[in-house]
Image: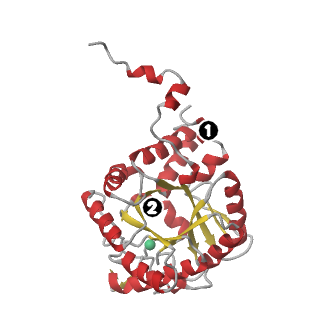
Amino acid sequence: MTLYRPRRLRTTQAVRDLVSETAIMPSRLIMPHFVREGSAVREAIETMPGIERVCLDNLLRDVEADLALGIRSLLLFGIPDEKDEAGSGAWNANGIVQRAVTAIKKRFPEICVITDVCLCEYTSHGHCGVAHEGTVLNDPTLELLAKTALSHAVAGADMVAPSDMMDGRVTAIRDVLDGGGCSDTAIMAYAAKYASAFYGPFRDAAGSTPQYGDRKSYQMDCRNAREAEREVMLDLDEGADIVMVKPALSYLDVIYRVKAISPVPVCAYNVSGEYAMVKAAARLGMGDERRLILEILTSIFRAGADMVISYHTRELLKNKWLQELMA
Ligand SMILES: [Zn+2]
């Protein structure tokens, strides 16, 4: 038998491109944004170079510039000025996220606006639900999450993305959305969200570090992958339109498993700590930033993600790095 030579299909860039199995498409990338109250606000986030907290006017400027680059989907996080025990700012019809959604959809109706639905940015204790004597109560939290989701949908969000990991939240949100005349608003569920050290920079950005304890009683244990399949099945039963795995890079096997069982699109979140590691390596001269980013994002898509939320989205398109993929 003659030797089969796989190297024949690696000879030139054109041949490599021709046989490539994975592509990063701009239409499948989602850019996250942090919006806060105030005017002329543009605050750098130290642990996430290139990412900023901005006021509504600057958000609209950024969204417009992003749209010109081809970025059509975004994920919005709100940073309220005030927090309280219940996190009541989360469902305020006049809150910063709700106003931002309405303003974006009014000026750029073609953009897909996804909102993060959680309480941790709004609670004084920084947990994702109703806290009582050191524990986070599941069922009392559902009503508050559903109210929050409805306020985003009424403001015009295309999709709401619950990130809290309470049991039963997708059903609770679907019921309230449907009852509130928002049956066309999709639910992107953070279905398999792990308690992860890779969220550190985000908590700086959003000011959502828990004031006591951790989130291990509701977010998943990083040792478990079969349990992720169970979480996904539950969210699908409850009516999730898209399921998400978060983080992405240390959970490529989970993305692969979820893709194999999910009849709905799979999203992966290339989180703040993954972004910060690349930035730190580049700053220290320990890696080629462009190639690191392309390889990481390619691996997430190759694992099975249909779409990826990434802080790299803007720089990728601005620097035209996709055009030189793997060159
Ligand atoms: Zn949360």
Quarter holding ligand 1: bottom left
- The secondary structure type at the circle numbered 1 is helix
The percent position of residue 16, horizontal first and vertical second, equals: 50, 28
- The secondary structure type at the circle numbered 2 is helix
Q: Is residue 43 left or right of residue 200?
A: right
Closer-to-camera residue (289/1):
1
Q: Label 2: how many residues lie within 10 Å, few (<14), some (14-19) or many (20+)?
A: some
Label tally: 2
Three-letter code, disc 1: Gln
Q: Which mark is residue 199?
A: 2
What residue is drawn where x is 33% and y is 81%? 138
What residue is drawn where x is 65% and y is 52%? 70
Three-letter code, disc 2: Tyr
Q: Quadrant of the N terminus?
A: top left
Sequence-first tag of 2 and 1: 2
- Real-space CA distance between mark 2 and mark 1, rounded to the nearest whole angstrom: 30 Å
In the rendered image, the residue lying farthest to the top is 2
Residue topped by disc 1: 323
Task: Evaluate whether residue 284 shows in this view.
Answer: no
